[in-house]
Amino acid sequence: MALDLATVDHLLTTTRSVRKRLDFSRPVEPAVIERCLEIAFQSPTGSNQQGWSALVVTDPAKRKTIGELYLKSFRDYVANPPVPPTYGSDDIRARQLPRVLDSANYLAEHMHEAPVFVIFCIEGRVEQGGVLLQASMYGSVLPAAWSFMLAARARGLGSAWTTLHLTHEQAVAKLLGIPDTVTQTVLLPVAYYTGTDFKPATRIPAKSITHWDAWGTRR
């Protein structure tokens, strides 16, 4: 079947981390989440092990607790960023940073209001091995999370890629009954979005960060 490349490219280039445009007042139907997850779990997985899982959180009390933990982590992160940005003043990332921080702060304060959280998990613990195991484990579940975001976007749902809840991973695991043998990865707050569309983001040109055959070699 021939694909409509214009539609596919538009979906891929306009799937944003949605924060301020999440509609917290509109419920999300479980069937929509289930369909997006069916699509998501068609993504690649190392050795076809399919050790992935998704935990959907709709309970208001649990979302409130997770939201409080996320907000605490966010405030700690802003106060003491692990790697302070070193962009030059003319770097596009430096110009975008105030807007990104503003929207991130908004989401942190309103995270619990999102009607659905989806936490993607993988069987095993990354602490048990080196970079190969970590790359393999994360590479076996994170594509599913991105596919979920794409499927959700196509259905009028927004989401945001977040990981700050992992500062309190054990507390979240206890709250949700996640076994100690399972690693949580990304947490996606999900809601319908306001407005009609998104536009491609301003990014560093791909050709300036693409290396051919050796680091630093451009085409």
Image: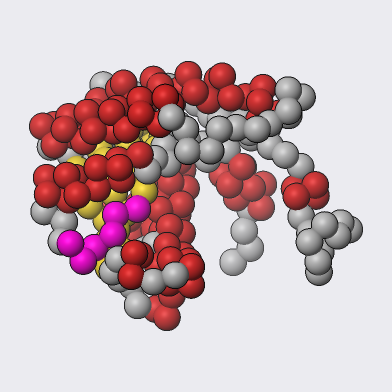
Relative to 85, say whether 10 is above or below: below
- Residue 155 visible (yes or no): no
How did the renderer colour the structure?
secondary structure
Which residue appears farthest toward the right when viewing the image? 219
Q: Position of residue 3 (x, y in %)?
A: 62, 58
| Residue positioned 28% across, 28% down in the render | 72
184 part of magenta stretch: yes
Picture quarter containing residue 144? Answer: bottom left
- Relative to 179, 93 lies left or right: right
Picture quarter containing residue 138? Answer: bottom left
Q: Main secondary structure of the magenta part?
A: strand
- Relative to 156, 210 lies left or right: right
Q: Position of residue 196 (x, y in %)?
A: 50, 26
| Residue positioned 60% across, 50% down in the render | 8
Picture quarter containing residue 121? Answer: bottom left
Q: Quadrant of the C terminus?
A: bottom right
Region rendered in magenta: 180-185
Report the label total: 0
193 part of magenta stretch: no
Judge by depth and name the residue closer to the eye, 145 or 65: 65
| Residue positioned 36% across, 48% down in the render | 186
Q: Position of residue 94 (x, y in %)?
A: 66, 26
Judge by depth and name the residue closer to the eye, 106 or 8: 106
